[in-house]
Image (cartoon, rainbow, N blue to C red):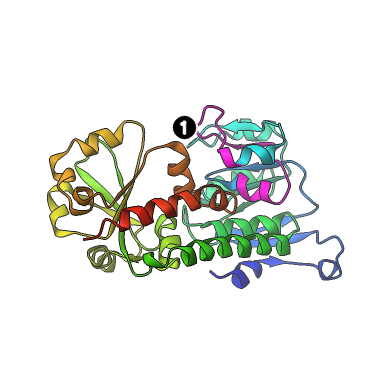
Amino acid sequence: MGLSGLLSTGTLSAAFAAGGNPFPIDIRHALGTTRIEAEPKRIVTLGWNGEDAVLALGRIPVGMHRYGLFERGILPWNEAYLKGQTPELLQSGVLDYEAIAALEPDLILAIKTGINEIEWQRLSSIAPTIVYTSAPWRADWREQMVLTGLALGEPQKAHDLVETAEKQLRDLATAHPELMGKTFIFGSYFPGEGTLGVYFARDPRVRELVAMGLRLAPEVDALMAKAPDANGTGVSLEELDRFDADVLIVWYGPGARADAEGQPLFKSFGPVRRGAYVALDDPVSVWATSAVSVLSIPYAFPDFVERIAAAAAKGR
């Protein structure tokens, strides 16, 4: 959904157009309509990088997701925006209703999540709760930013933040014209599975690179045509010789990179053999590319794109 479509999910009062108080506001999303009666003061964010959008708008959540790969459980590009405060950090993958209620929120943002209707209704009994307009776990950073802007009564500021981030990505593409048309595979690897996870065009890890002018490898396009609604699939290491690309990008959890690079079939894969390979195994690179936001783009994408350009220069 484009920015104009996302903006239309909120029913804004005439006072907003006049620069006054926009509340109450009704926001439509995939599970229903949520009314926010007054400007939220105590905000809880659930799921991936929901706090980024709130912090970018100058607010500090009272509760947010804990990121286990970081010592403080906080994404590094958020530290400065927290101004020395530490919100309650909520356990990843668990909906702890009691812990959320104890924070006495007046708004819950659960946009980049897989929350279902029953869970939404239960959260809504605690505070007004906004989820995705797209689908479970499908909300990209634009959707998250715009919905958050609506919920906080600042849709124009949210729109401006999206446009600034998009310009930063365009500027990176302009600075690296040699990447235009280069093919890539963006994957993941987990020890013991014997496969390389391959992401499709609808996945946010892939979407921004395509927007910058790179192309998914033709073999990935062929897989995607067979499963157009999927985010990706697994490819057996034994079948990697059927694939190739100008660049291979793989993100790894702790210890996974050494396991992958110890596999003979992986080491002989074309991009790996040529050195046209970007391994994302540090927490900043993993999270910045998996949970893209208006804050992670300026923080981490310049280095990420430089690494892709260096890998692409290895040629085929």
In which quadrant is the C terminus drawn?
Answer: bottom left
Write the residue at 27% across / 69% down: 225
Give percent across and percent down for residue 161.
Answer: 65, 59
Q: Quadrant of residue 206?
A: bottom left
Furthest-top residue in this view: 71
Give percent across and percent down for residue 76.
Answer: 57, 38
- Towards the viewer: 143 or 32: 143
Q: Is residue 192 above or below residue 37?
A: above
Give percent across and percent down for residue 283.
Answer: 45, 37
Amino acid type at mark 1: Leu
Q: Is residue 54 magenta?
A: yes
Q: Quadrant of residue 8?
A: bottom right
Q: Is residue 74 visible?
A: yes
Q: Is residue 247 magenta?
A: no
Judge left or right: residue 285 versus residue 159.
left
Regarding mark 1 in the picture, which secondary structure is present there? loop
Highlighted range, magenta: 51-77
How many numbered circles are shown? 1
Circle 1 Cα neighbour tier, 10 Å, few/some/many (<14 / 14–19 / ≥20): some
State the residue position of label 1.
69
- Towards the viewer: 30 or 42: 42
Judge left or right: residue 184 versus residue 109.
left
Write the residue at 34% across / 70% down: 181
Give percent across and percent down for residue 252.
Answer: 34, 40
